[in-house]
Protein backbone atom coordinates (compact mmCIF):
# COMPACT_ATOMS: atom_id res chain seq x y z
CA UNK A 1 0.00 0.00 0.00
CA UNK A 2 1.36 3.42 -0.88
CA UNK A 3 2.32 5.57 2.00
CA UNK A 4 1.27 9.20 2.02
CA UNK A 5 3.89 11.65 3.27
CA UNK A 6 2.92 14.82 5.07
CA UNK A 7 4.09 17.12 2.26
CA UNK A 8 1.74 15.30 -0.17
CA UNK A 9 4.58 14.08 -2.44
CA UNK A 10 2.78 10.81 -3.24
CA UNK A 11 -0.30 12.65 -4.64
CA UNK A 12 2.05 14.87 -6.55
CA UNK A 13 3.75 11.76 -7.91
CA UNK A 14 0.38 10.27 -8.75
CA UNK A 15 -0.68 13.36 -10.71
CA UNK A 16 2.64 13.37 -12.48
CA UNK A 17 2.33 9.75 -13.51
CA UNK A 18 -1.29 10.39 -14.65
CA UNK A 19 -0.06 13.32 -16.71
CA UNK A 20 2.77 11.21 -18.10
CA UNK A 21 0.31 8.48 -18.99
CA UNK A 22 -2.05 10.98 -20.66
CA UNK A 23 0.83 12.61 -22.51
CA UNK A 24 2.16 9.23 -23.49
CA UNK A 25 -1.25 8.11 -24.76
CA UNK A 26 -1.68 11.35 -26.75
CA UNK A 27 1.84 10.94 -28.09
CA UNK A 28 1.14 7.30 -28.81
CA UNK A 29 -2.01 8.25 -30.74
CA UNK A 30 -0.13 10.85 -32.81
CA UNK A 31 3.20 9.09 -33.15
CA UNK A 32 2.22 5.45 -33.34
CA UNK A 33 -1.48 4.82 -33.82
CA UNK A 34 -2.41 7.43 -36.45
CA UNK A 35 0.63 6.83 -38.66
CA UNK A 36 0.04 3.09 -38.37
CA UNK A 37 -3.61 3.50 -39.37
CA UNK A 38 -2.59 5.81 -42.19
CA UNK A 39 0.07 3.35 -43.37
CA UNK A 40 -2.41 0.46 -43.21
CA UNK A 41 -5.04 2.41 -45.13
CA UNK A 42 -2.49 3.51 -47.79
CA UNK A 43 -1.17 -0.06 -48.07
CA UNK A 44 -4.71 -1.47 -48.34
CA UNK A 45 -5.61 1.09 -51.00
CA UNK A 46 -2.46 0.30 -52.96
CA UNK A 47 -3.00 -3.46 -52.76
CA UNK A 48 -6.69 -3.11 -53.66
CA UNK A 49 -6.09 -0.78 -56.61
CA UNK A 50 -3.17 -2.80 -57.86
CA UNK A 51 -4.55 -6.35 -57.51
CA UNK A 52 -8.32 -6.32 -56.87
CA UNK A 53 -9.68 -3.22 -58.65
CA UNK A 54 -11.84 -3.98 -61.75
CA UNK A 55 -9.10 -2.35 -63.90
CA UNK A 56 -6.27 -4.29 -62.25
CA UNK A 57 -5.70 -6.63 -65.22
CA UNK A 58 -5.05 -3.75 -67.62
CA UNK A 59 -1.38 -3.21 -68.45
CA UNK A 60 0.36 0.03 -67.60
CA UNK A 61 3.14 1.55 -65.51
CA UNK A 62 3.35 0.11 -61.98
CA UNK A 63 2.90 3.38 -60.04
CA UNK A 64 0.06 4.50 -62.30
CA UNK A 65 -1.99 1.49 -61.19
CA UNK A 66 -2.52 2.84 -57.70
CA UNK A 67 -2.02 6.63 -57.77
CA UNK A 68 -2.99 9.52 -60.02
CA UNK A 69 0.22 11.26 -58.96
CA UNK A 70 2.02 9.30 -61.66
CA UNK A 71 -0.18 10.95 -64.30
CA UNK A 72 0.18 14.41 -62.77
CA UNK A 73 3.96 14.14 -62.69
CA UNK A 74 3.99 13.01 -66.31
CA UNK A 75 1.64 15.83 -67.31
CA UNK A 76 4.15 18.17 -65.74
CA UNK A 77 6.95 16.96 -68.02
CA UNK A 78 4.97 18.72 -70.82
CA UNK A 79 5.60 15.70 -73.03
CA UNK A 80 2.25 13.93 -72.89
CA UNK A 81 1.98 13.91 -76.70
CA UNK A 82 5.17 11.83 -76.94
CA UNK A 83 4.70 9.81 -73.77
CA UNK A 84 1.26 8.49 -74.74
CA UNK A 85 2.59 7.18 -78.04
CA UNK A 86 5.47 5.45 -76.23
CA UNK A 87 3.10 3.95 -73.64
CA UNK A 88 0.89 2.42 -76.33
CA UNK A 89 3.96 1.02 -78.05
CA UNK A 90 5.06 -0.59 -74.80
CA UNK A 91 1.74 -1.76 -73.31
CA UNK A 92 -0.60 -2.12 -76.31
CA UNK A 93 -3.94 -0.58 -77.32
CA UNK A 94 -5.27 -0.18 -73.78
CA UNK A 95 -3.14 1.33 -71.00
CA UNK A 96 -4.00 2.02 -67.36
CA UNK A 97 -2.61 5.49 -66.69
CA UNK A 98 -4.15 5.90 -63.25
CA UNK A 99 -6.05 3.62 -60.89
CA UNK A 100 -9.39 4.70 -62.42
CA UNK A 101 -8.21 5.89 -65.82
CA UNK A 102 -7.37 4.11 -69.08
CA UNK A 103 -6.38 5.40 -72.49
CA UNK A 104 -6.95 3.66 -75.80
CA UNK A 105 -5.32 3.74 -79.20
CA UNK A 106 -8.19 1.85 -80.83
CA UNK A 107 -10.13 3.62 -83.55
CA UNK A 108 -13.20 1.47 -82.78
CA UNK A 109 -13.17 2.63 -79.14
CA UNK A 110 -12.60 6.24 -80.21
CA UNK A 111 -15.71 6.11 -82.42
CA UNK A 112 -17.80 4.96 -79.45
CA UNK A 113 -16.34 7.42 -76.93
CA UNK A 114 -16.65 10.42 -79.23
CA UNK A 115 -19.89 9.41 -80.96
CA UNK A 116 -22.18 12.41 -81.59
CA UNK A 117 -25.04 10.36 -80.11
CA UNK A 118 -23.04 8.98 -77.20
CA UNK A 119 -23.42 9.73 -73.52
CA UNK A 120 -19.75 9.91 -72.52
CA UNK A 121 -19.48 12.99 -70.33
CA UNK A 122 -16.28 14.99 -69.83
CA UNK A 123 -14.19 13.95 -66.81
CA UNK A 124 -13.27 16.22 -63.88
CA UNK A 125 -9.95 16.95 -65.65
CA UNK A 126 -11.80 19.77 -67.39
CA UNK A 127 -12.69 21.49 -64.12
CA UNK A 128 -9.23 23.02 -64.37
CA UNK A 129 -10.19 24.88 -67.54
CA UNK A 130 -13.40 26.40 -66.23
CA UNK A 131 -14.36 28.90 -63.54
CA UNK A 132 -13.68 27.97 -59.93
CA UNK A 133 -17.38 27.69 -59.28
CA UNK A 134 -19.90 26.63 -61.88
CA UNK A 135 -23.10 28.66 -61.27
CA UNK A 136 -26.16 29.58 -63.33
CA UNK A 137 -24.49 32.92 -64.08
CA UNK A 138 -20.98 31.59 -64.79
CA UNK A 139 -21.47 29.17 -67.66
CA UNK A 140 -18.50 27.50 -69.31
CA UNK A 141 -19.01 25.51 -72.50
CA UNK A 142 -15.52 24.07 -72.01
CA UNK A 143 -15.93 22.59 -68.55
CA UNK A 144 -19.67 22.12 -67.97
CA UNK A 145 -20.38 18.52 -66.97
CA UNK A 146 -24.07 18.81 -66.13
CA UNK A 147 -25.31 17.45 -69.46
CA UNK A 148 -28.86 18.88 -69.57
CA UNK A 149 -27.40 22.31 -68.74
CA UNK A 150 -24.58 21.84 -71.26
CA UNK A 151 -27.06 20.94 -74.02
CA UNK A 152 -29.11 24.04 -73.18
CA UNK A 153 -26.04 26.34 -73.29
CA UNK A 154 -24.89 24.78 -76.55
CA UNK A 155 -28.34 25.16 -78.14
CA UNK A 156 -28.65 28.78 -77.05
CA UNK A 157 -25.14 29.87 -78.07
CA UNK A 158 -24.96 27.78 -81.26
CA UNK A 159 -26.40 30.34 -83.72
CA UNK A 160 -23.44 32.76 -83.41
CA UNK A 161 -20.88 30.08 -84.21
CA UNK A 162 -22.30 28.53 -87.40
CA UNK A 163 -20.33 28.93 -90.65
CA UNK A 164 -22.96 31.32 -92.02
CA UNK A 165 -22.68 33.46 -88.88
CA UNK A 166 -18.89 33.64 -88.73
CA UNK A 167 -18.56 34.29 -92.46
CA UNK A 168 -20.26 37.62 -91.76
CA UNK A 169 -17.23 38.62 -89.68
CA UNK A 170 -14.57 37.57 -92.16
CA UNK A 171 -14.21 41.06 -93.64
CA UNK A 172 -13.06 42.16 -90.17
CA UNK A 173 -9.95 40.00 -90.63
CA UNK A 174 -8.88 41.91 -93.75
CA UNK A 175 -7.33 45.04 -92.14
CA UNK A 176 -5.40 42.79 -89.73
CA UNK A 177 -4.02 40.74 -92.60
CA UNK A 178 -3.09 43.85 -94.56
CA UNK A 179 -1.20 45.18 -91.56
CA UNK A 180 0.47 41.82 -91.13
CA UNK A 181 1.71 41.76 -94.75
CA UNK A 182 3.03 45.30 -94.38
CA UNK A 183 4.90 44.46 -91.19
CA UNK A 184 6.34 41.19 -92.50
CA UNK A 185 7.49 42.97 -95.65
CA UNK A 186 9.50 45.33 -93.42
CA UNK A 187 10.82 42.36 -91.44
CA UNK A 188 12.06 40.46 -94.51
CA UNK A 189 15.30 38.61 -93.83
CA UNK A 190 15.08 39.05 -90.06
CA UNK A 191 14.85 36.17 -87.60
CA UNK A 192 11.22 36.02 -86.40
CA UNK A 193 9.97 33.99 -83.45
CA UNK A 194 7.36 31.84 -85.18
CA UNK A 195 5.21 30.92 -82.16
CA UNK A 196 5.08 34.52 -80.94
CA UNK A 197 4.08 35.87 -84.35
CA UNK A 198 1.41 33.23 -84.86
CA UNK A 199 -0.05 33.99 -81.43
CA UNK A 200 -0.07 37.71 -82.16
CA UNK A 201 -1.78 37.38 -85.51
CA UNK A 202 -4.28 34.78 -84.18
CA UNK A 203 -5.26 37.06 -81.31
CA UNK A 204 -5.72 40.06 -83.55
CA UNK A 205 -7.81 38.06 -86.04
CA UNK A 206 -10.09 36.70 -83.32
CA UNK A 207 -10.26 40.04 -81.53
CA UNK A 208 -11.35 41.74 -84.76
CA UNK A 209 -14.05 39.17 -85.43
CA UNK A 210 -15.41 39.63 -81.93
CA UNK A 211 -15.12 43.43 -81.56
CA UNK A 212 -14.77 44.78 -85.16
CA UNK A 213 -11.33 46.09 -84.28
CA UNK A 214 -8.11 44.97 -82.64
CA UNK A 215 -5.30 46.53 -80.61
CA UNK A 216 -2.42 46.82 -83.03
CA UNK A 217 0.22 44.47 -81.63
CA UNK A 218 1.41 43.54 -85.12
CA UNK A 219 3.13 46.89 -85.77
CA UNK A 220 5.25 46.72 -82.63
CA UNK A 221 5.52 42.93 -82.49
CA UNK A 222 5.50 43.30 -78.73
CA UNK A 223 3.15 40.92 -76.93
CA UNK A 224 4.73 41.82 -73.55
CA UNK A 225 5.76 38.21 -73.02
CA UNK A 226 2.23 36.78 -73.23
CA UNK A 227 3.18 34.00 -75.62
CA UNK A 228 5.96 32.96 -73.28
CA UNK A 229 3.56 33.07 -70.35
CA UNK A 230 1.14 30.60 -71.91
CA UNK A 231 3.77 27.92 -72.07
CA UNK A 232 5.89 28.75 -69.06
CA UNK A 233 3.46 29.63 -66.33
CA UNK A 234 1.80 26.25 -66.23
CA UNK A 235 1.61 24.88 -62.74
CA UNK A 236 -0.34 21.97 -61.34
CA UNK A 237 -2.66 23.36 -58.72
CA UNK A 238 -4.26 21.45 -55.86
CA UNK A 239 -2.48 18.39 -57.12
CA UNK A 240 -2.58 16.55 -53.81
CA UNK A 241 -6.26 17.21 -53.16
CA UNK A 242 -7.42 16.73 -56.72
CA UNK A 243 -4.59 15.53 -58.86
CA UNK A 244 -6.20 16.30 -62.19
CA UNK A 245 -6.85 19.97 -61.46
CA UNK A 246 -4.39 22.38 -62.94
CA UNK A 247 -4.27 25.88 -64.26
CA UNK A 248 -2.33 27.33 -67.10
CA UNK A 249 -1.06 30.86 -67.24
CA UNK A 250 -3.45 33.45 -68.54
CA UNK A 251 -1.98 35.84 -71.08
CA UNK A 252 -2.34 39.19 -69.38
CA UNK A 253 -2.09 41.67 -72.23
CA UNK A 254 -4.57 39.78 -74.40
CA UNK A 255 -6.85 39.25 -71.40
CA UNK A 256 -6.75 42.93 -70.43
CA UNK A 257 -7.51 43.99 -73.99
CA UNK A 258 -10.57 41.76 -74.04
CA UNK A 259 -11.70 43.03 -70.63
CA UNK A 260 -11.38 46.66 -71.73
CA UNK A 261 -13.26 46.08 -74.98
CA UNK A 262 -16.03 44.17 -73.21
CA UNK A 263 -16.43 47.07 -70.80
CA UNK A 264 -16.60 49.58 -73.67
CA UNK A 265 -19.14 47.48 -75.48
CA UNK A 266 -21.41 46.84 -72.56
CA UNK A 267 -21.48 50.46 -71.45
CA UNK A 268 -22.15 52.17 -74.76
CA UNK A 269 -25.20 51.63 -76.94
CA UNK A 270 -23.32 53.34 -79.77
CA UNK A 271 -21.27 50.20 -80.37
CA UNK A 272 -24.28 47.98 -80.83
CA UNK A 273 -24.75 49.32 -84.34
CA UNK A 274 -21.58 47.48 -85.40
CA UNK A 275 -21.92 44.11 -87.04
CA UNK A 276 -19.62 41.63 -85.33
CA UNK A 277 -19.65 38.61 -83.04
CA UNK A 278 -20.22 40.70 -79.90
CA UNK A 279 -23.27 42.45 -81.36
CA UNK A 280 -24.71 39.10 -82.40
CA UNK A 281 -24.17 37.77 -78.89
CA UNK A 282 -26.07 40.78 -77.49
CA UNK A 283 -28.86 40.19 -80.02
CA UNK A 284 -28.98 36.58 -78.92
CA UNK A 285 -29.40 37.75 -75.36
CA UNK A 286 -32.18 40.10 -76.40
CA UNK A 287 -34.12 37.37 -78.18
CA UNK A 288 -33.49 34.35 -75.91
CA UNK A 289 -34.72 34.65 -72.32
CA UNK A 290 -32.48 31.73 -71.27
CA UNK A 291 -29.35 33.59 -72.44
CA UNK A 292 -28.27 35.37 -69.26
CA UNK A 293 -26.72 38.84 -69.27
CA UNK A 294 -23.56 37.53 -67.58
CA UNK A 295 -22.99 35.19 -70.52
CA UNK A 296 -22.34 38.09 -72.92
CA UNK A 297 -18.77 38.79 -71.73
CA UNK A 298 -18.19 35.08 -71.13
CA UNK A 299 -18.80 34.37 -74.81
CA UNK A 300 -16.12 36.90 -75.76
CA UNK A 301 -13.64 35.44 -73.27
CA UNK A 302 -14.41 32.00 -74.62
CA UNK A 303 -13.14 32.99 -78.04
CA UNK A 304 -9.93 34.37 -76.54
CA UNK A 305 -9.27 31.56 -74.06
CA UNK A 306 -10.21 28.64 -76.30
CA UNK A 307 -9.11 30.15 -79.60
CA UNK A 308 -5.92 32.19 -79.41
CA UNK A 309 -3.63 29.49 -78.09
CA UNK A 310 -5.01 26.62 -80.20
CA UNK A 311 -4.98 28.71 -83.36
CA UNK A 312 -1.49 30.11 -82.71
CA UNK A 313 0.00 26.68 -82.15
CA UNK A 314 -1.89 25.16 -85.10
CA UNK A 315 -0.47 27.79 -87.47
CA UNK A 316 3.03 27.44 -86.00
CA UNK A 317 3.09 23.67 -86.65
CA UNK A 318 1.67 24.17 -90.13
CA UNK A 319 4.34 26.66 -91.16
CA UNK A 320 7.12 24.48 -89.75
CA UNK A 321 5.83 21.47 -91.72
CA UNK A 322 5.56 23.42 -94.96
CA UNK A 323 8.97 25.06 -94.56
CA UNK A 324 10.55 21.65 -93.94
CA UNK A 325 8.95 20.09 -97.00
CA UNK A 326 10.06 22.07 -100.07
CA UNK A 327 7.89 19.94 -102.39
CA UNK A 328 4.77 20.85 -100.36
CA UNK A 329 5.74 24.52 -100.27
CA UNK A 330 6.25 24.56 -104.02
CA UNK A 331 2.86 22.92 -104.67
CA UNK A 332 1.11 25.47 -102.44
CA UNK A 333 2.83 28.35 -104.21
CA UNK A 334 1.89 26.90 -107.62
CA UNK A 335 -1.73 26.46 -106.56
CA UNK A 336 -1.92 30.04 -105.30
CA UNK A 337 -0.24 31.48 -108.38
CA UNK A 338 -2.60 29.58 -110.70
CA UNK A 339 -5.65 30.77 -108.72
CA UNK A 340 -4.37 34.36 -108.76
CA UNK A 341 -3.73 34.27 -112.52
CA UNK A 342 -7.20 32.81 -113.10
CA UNK A 343 -8.69 35.73 -111.15
CA UNK A 344 -9.96 33.39 -108.44
CA UNK A 345 -8.40 35.27 -105.54
CA UNK A 346 -9.63 38.73 -104.60
CA UNK A 347 -6.77 41.18 -104.03
CA UNK A 348 -5.33 42.13 -101.60
CA UNK A 349 -7.23 39.77 -99.26
CA UNK A 350 -9.16 36.82 -100.69
CA UNK A 351 -12.55 35.77 -99.38
CA UNK A 352 -13.02 32.68 -97.22
CA UNK A 353 -14.91 30.87 -100.00
CA UNK A 354 -12.03 31.50 -102.41
CA UNK A 355 -9.52 30.17 -99.85
CA UNK A 356 -11.63 27.12 -99.02
CA UNK A 357 -11.72 26.26 -102.74
CA UNK A 358 -7.93 25.67 -102.77
CA UNK A 359 -7.70 21.87 -102.45
CA UNK A 360 -3.97 21.51 -101.84
CA UNK A 361 -3.71 24.25 -99.21
CA UNK A 362 -6.78 22.85 -97.45
CA UNK A 363 -5.28 19.33 -97.50
CA UNK A 364 -2.03 20.74 -96.06
CA UNK A 365 -3.86 22.27 -93.12
CA UNK A 366 -5.80 19.06 -92.42
CA UNK A 367 -2.58 17.02 -92.65
CA UNK A 368 -0.72 19.32 -90.29
CA UNK A 369 -3.57 19.19 -87.78
CA UNK A 370 -3.47 15.39 -88.06
CA UNK A 371 0.21 15.01 -87.18
CA UNK A 372 0.34 18.00 -84.85
CA UNK A 373 -3.14 18.23 -83.34
CA UNK A 374 -2.93 21.20 -81.04
CA UNK A 375 -4.66 19.24 -78.25
CA UNK A 376 -1.98 16.67 -77.46
CA UNK A 377 -3.54 15.22 -74.33
CA UNK A 378 -6.17 12.50 -73.89
CA UNK A 379 -9.69 13.89 -74.38
CA UNK A 380 -10.92 12.34 -71.14
CA UNK A 381 -14.49 11.11 -70.77
CA UNK A 382 -16.40 9.03 -68.21
CA UNK A 383 -17.84 5.59 -68.98
CA UNK A 384 -21.64 5.83 -68.62
CA UNK A 385 -23.97 3.53 -66.66
CA UNK A 386 -23.70 -0.12 -67.59
CA UNK A 387 -19.97 0.05 -68.36
CA UNK A 388 -18.35 -0.87 -71.66
CA UNK A 389 -15.98 -3.46 -73.09
CA UNK A 390 -13.02 -2.20 -75.13
CA UNK A 391 -10.16 -4.39 -76.33
CA UNK A 392 -11.68 -7.34 -74.45
CA UNK A 393 -11.56 -5.53 -71.10
CA UNK A 394 -14.66 -4.55 -69.16
CA UNK A 395 -14.56 -0.96 -67.90
CA UNK A 396 -17.17 -0.24 -65.21
CA UNK A 397 -19.29 2.93 -65.18
CA UNK A 398 -17.29 5.87 -63.85
CA UNK A 399 -13.96 4.76 -65.38
CA UNK A 400 -12.12 7.66 -66.98
CA UNK A 401 -11.41 6.78 -70.56
CA UNK A 402 -10.16 8.48 -73.70
CA UNK A 403 -7.84 8.70 -76.68
CA UNK A 404 -5.00 11.06 -77.47
CA UNK A 405 -5.60 12.65 -80.93
CA UNK A 406 -1.86 12.38 -81.58
CA UNK A 407 -2.13 8.59 -81.26
CA UNK A 408 -5.41 8.07 -83.17
CA UNK A 409 -4.16 10.30 -85.99
CA UNK A 410 -1.26 7.93 -86.64
CA UNK A 411 -3.39 4.82 -87.07
CA UNK A 412 -1.93 2.96 -90.05
CA UNK A 413 -5.19 1.12 -90.73
CA UNK A 414 -6.88 4.47 -91.43
CA UNK A 415 -4.10 6.72 -92.72
CA UNK A 416 -1.93 4.10 -94.47
CA UNK A 417 1.56 2.73 -93.96
CA UNK A 418 3.05 6.24 -94.17
CA UNK A 419 0.84 7.54 -91.33
CA UNK A 420 3.89 9.01 -89.56
CA UNK A 421 4.85 11.08 -92.60
CA UNK A 422 3.63 14.58 -93.50
CA UNK A 423 1.88 14.05 -96.83
CA UNK A 424 -1.07 16.31 -97.82
CA UNK A 425 -1.53 14.28 -101.00
CA UNK A 426 -3.05 11.44 -98.98
CA UNK A 427 -6.40 13.29 -99.01
CA UNK A 428 -6.26 14.17 -102.70
CA UNK A 429 -5.36 10.61 -103.75
CA UNK A 430 -7.83 8.87 -101.43
CA UNK A 431 -11.12 7.30 -102.54
CA UNK A 432 -14.34 8.95 -101.39
CA UNK A 433 -14.78 6.21 -98.79
CA UNK A 434 -11.21 6.56 -97.44
CA UNK A 435 -11.73 10.32 -97.18
CA UNK A 436 -14.96 9.80 -95.25
CA UNK A 437 -13.24 7.38 -92.89
CA UNK A 438 -10.24 9.70 -92.29
CA UNK A 439 -12.64 12.52 -91.52
CA UNK A 440 -14.81 10.37 -89.25
CA UNK A 441 -11.79 9.32 -87.18
CA UNK A 442 -10.16 12.75 -86.96
CA UNK A 443 -10.08 14.37 -83.53
CA UNK A 444 -8.49 17.62 -84.70
CA UNK A 445 -11.58 19.45 -83.46
CA UNK A 446 -12.33 16.87 -80.78
CA UNK A 447 -15.40 14.68 -81.22
CA UNK A 448 -19.03 13.97 -80.52
CA UNK A 449 -21.25 16.41 -78.73
CA UNK A 450 -18.16 18.05 -77.13
CA UNK A 451 -16.56 18.81 -80.53
CA UNK A 452 -15.05 22.29 -80.83
CA UNK A 453 -17.86 24.83 -81.41
CA UNK A 454 -15.27 27.40 -82.57
CA UNK A 455 -14.05 25.30 -85.52
CA UNK A 456 -15.82 27.46 -88.13
CA UNK A 457 -14.48 30.69 -86.68
CA UNK A 458 -10.95 29.25 -86.57
CA UNK A 459 -11.26 27.82 -90.07
CA UNK A 460 -12.36 31.12 -91.59
CA UNK A 461 -9.52 33.06 -89.93
CA UNK A 462 -6.88 30.41 -90.63
CA UNK A 463 -7.84 29.82 -94.27
CA UNK A 464 -7.57 33.53 -95.00
CA UNK A 465 -4.30 33.82 -93.11
CA UNK A 466 -2.66 30.83 -94.84
CA UNK A 467 -3.67 32.03 -98.30
CA UNK A 468 -2.24 35.48 -97.66
CA UNK A 469 0.90 34.20 -95.91
CA UNK A 470 1.94 31.62 -98.52
CA UNK A 471 0.78 33.84 -101.40
CA UNK A 472 2.91 36.77 -100.28
CA UNK A 473 6.00 35.19 -98.70
CA UNK A 474 8.49 32.42 -99.08
CA UNK A 475 9.22 31.00 -95.64
CA UNK A 476 12.40 29.33 -94.39
CA UNK A 477 13.30 28.10 -90.93
CA UNK A 478 16.57 29.26 -89.45
CA UNK A 479 18.94 26.41 -88.72
CA UNK A 480 20.84 25.93 -85.47
CA UNK A 481 24.18 27.45 -86.68
CA UNK A 482 22.42 30.57 -88.04
CA UNK A 483 20.58 30.98 -84.74
CA UNK A 484 23.77 30.57 -82.75
CA UNK A 485 25.42 33.31 -84.82
CA UNK A 486 22.48 35.58 -84.01
CA UNK A 487 22.69 34.64 -80.34
CA UNK A 488 19.15 33.20 -80.38
CA UNK A 489 17.69 30.26 -78.48
CA UNK A 490 17.49 27.50 -81.05
CA UNK A 491 16.24 24.71 -78.85
CA UNK A 492 13.17 23.98 -80.85
CA UNK A 493 10.77 21.54 -79.22
CA UNK A 494 7.13 20.64 -78.98
CA UNK A 495 5.74 20.92 -75.48
CA UNK A 496 2.31 19.92 -74.37
CA UNK A 497 0.00 20.85 -71.57
CA UNK A 498 -3.34 22.38 -72.35
CA UNK A 499 -2.25 22.76 -75.97
CA UNK A 500 0.84 21.47 -77.72
CA UNK A 501 3.13 24.16 -79.07
CA UNK A 502 6.34 24.30 -80.97
CA UNK A 503 8.61 26.76 -79.26
CA UNK A 504 12.08 27.91 -80.26
CA UNK A 505 11.44 27.89 -84.04
CA UNK A 506 12.56 31.01 -85.91
CA UNK A 507 11.51 31.86 -89.46
CA UNK A 508 12.88 34.11 -92.18
CA UNK A 509 10.56 35.54 -94.84
CA UNK A 510 11.18 36.72 -98.40
CA UNK A 511 8.49 38.61 -100.28
CA UNK A 512 7.38 36.78 -103.43
CA UNK A 513 7.31 38.87 -106.58
C1 LIG B 1 -7.27 26.18 -84.58
C2 LIG B 1 -8.02 26.53 -83.56
C3 LIG B 1 -8.73 25.54 -82.66
C4 LIG B 1 -8.47 24.22 -82.45
C5 LIG B 1 -7.38 23.35 -83.07
C6 LIG B 1 -9.44 23.74 -81.49
C7 LIG B 1 -9.51 22.44 -81.04
C8 LIG B 1 -10.42 21.99 -80.13
C9 LIG B 1 -10.52 20.62 -79.66
C10 LIG B 1 -9.65 19.47 -80.13
C11 LIG B 1 -11.51 20.58 -78.75
C12 LIG B 1 -11.98 19.34 -77.98
C13 LIG B 1 -11.27 19.29 -76.66
C14 LIG B 1 -11.71 18.15 -75.79
O1 LIG B 1 -12.61 17.39 -76.09
O2 LIG B 1 -11.06 18.03 -74.76
C15 LIG B 1 -12.04 21.91 -78.62
C16 LIG B 1 -13.06 22.26 -77.76
C17 LIG B 1 -13.54 23.53 -77.65
N1 LIG B 1 -13.20 24.63 -78.41
FE1 LIG B 1 -11.83 24.69 -79.85
N2 LIG B 1 -10.26 24.79 -81.14
C18 LIG B 1 -9.87 25.89 -81.84
C19 LIG B 1 -10.44 27.15 -81.81
C20 LIG B 1 -11.51 27.49 -81.04
C21 LIG B 1 -12.16 28.78 -81.05
C22 LIG B 1 -11.80 29.96 -81.97
C23 LIG B 1 -13.14 28.73 -80.11
C24 LIG B 1 -14.15 29.79 -79.74
C25 LIG B 1 -14.97 30.33 -80.56
C26 LIG B 1 -13.11 27.40 -79.52
C27 LIG B 1 -13.95 26.96 -78.51
C28 LIG B 1 -13.95 25.70 -77.98
C29 LIG B 1 -14.82 25.26 -76.90
C30 LIG B 1 -15.82 26.13 -76.16
C31 LIG B 1 -14.56 23.91 -76.69
C32 LIG B 1 -15.22 22.99 -75.66
C33 LIG B 1 -16.44 22.36 -76.26
C34 LIG B 1 -17.16 21.42 -75.32
O3 LIG B 1 -16.65 21.03 -74.30
O4 LIG B 1 -18.28 21.06 -75.64
N3 LIG B 1 -12.12 26.69 -80.12
N4 LIG B 1 -11.37 22.75 -79.48
Image (cartoon, helix red, strand yellow):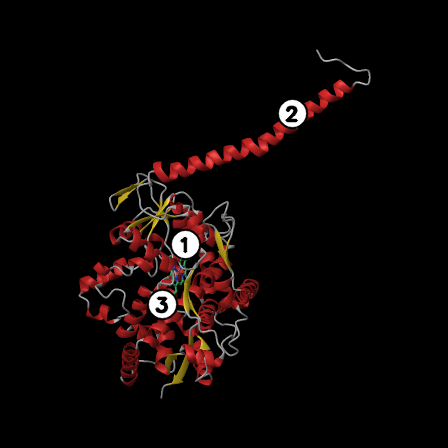
Residues 167 and 284: in front is 167
Instruction: Tell me the residue that label 2 is attached to.
Output: 21
Q: Position of residue 3 (x, y in %)?
A: 75, 13
Residue depicted at x 42% and y 70%: 492
- N-terminal label among 2 and 3: 2
Query: Are dots 3 and 1 in contact, CB under 8 Å?
Result: no
Callout 3: CB less than 8 Å from ligand 1: yes
Instruction: Tell me the residue that label 3 is attached to.
Output: 459
Residue 266: mark: none
Query: Callout 1: few (<14), some (14-19), or many (20+) C-alpha neighbours within 10 Å?
Result: some
Residues 126 and 257: in front is 126
Residue depicted at x 47% and y 57%: 285
Identify the element where label 1 is drawn: helix
Q: Nearer the viewer, mark 1 or mark 2?
A: 2
Callout 1: CB less than 8 Å from ligand 1: no
* Any part of residue 402 in sight: yes
Residue depicted at x 30% and y 48%: 118
Q: Quadrant of residue 329?
A: bottom left
As measured in the structure, the alpha-carbon distance from the residue carrying label 1 to the one carrying label 2 is 68 Å
Identify the element where label 3 is drawn: helix
Instruction: Tell me the residue that label 1 is attached to.
Output: 156
Query: Callout 2: few (<14), some (14-19), or many (20+) C-alpha neighbours within 10 Å?
Result: few
Q: Quadrant of residue 50?
A: top left
Q: Nearer the viewer, mark 3 or mark 1?
A: 3
- N-terminal label among 3 and 1: 1
Q: Position of residue 428 (x, y in %)?
A: 22, 70
Q: Position of residue 25 (x, y in %)?
A: 61, 27
What is the number of callouts on the image?
3
Amino acid sequence: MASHSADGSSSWLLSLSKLALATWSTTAVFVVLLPSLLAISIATTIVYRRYFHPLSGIPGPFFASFTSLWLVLHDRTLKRHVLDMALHKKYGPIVRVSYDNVMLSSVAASKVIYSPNGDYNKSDYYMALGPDQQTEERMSLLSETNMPRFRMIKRVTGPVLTLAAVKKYERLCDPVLERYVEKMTQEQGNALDLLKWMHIVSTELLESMVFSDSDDIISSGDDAGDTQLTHEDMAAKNWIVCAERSEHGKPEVFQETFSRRIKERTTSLEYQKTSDFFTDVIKLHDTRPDFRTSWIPLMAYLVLNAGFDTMGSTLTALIIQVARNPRVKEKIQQELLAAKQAGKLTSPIPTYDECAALPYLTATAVESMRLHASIGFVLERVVPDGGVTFEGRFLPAGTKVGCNPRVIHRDKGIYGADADVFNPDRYLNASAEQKREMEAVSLRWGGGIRKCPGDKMAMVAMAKFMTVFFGEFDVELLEEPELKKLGLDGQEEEISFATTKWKGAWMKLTKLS
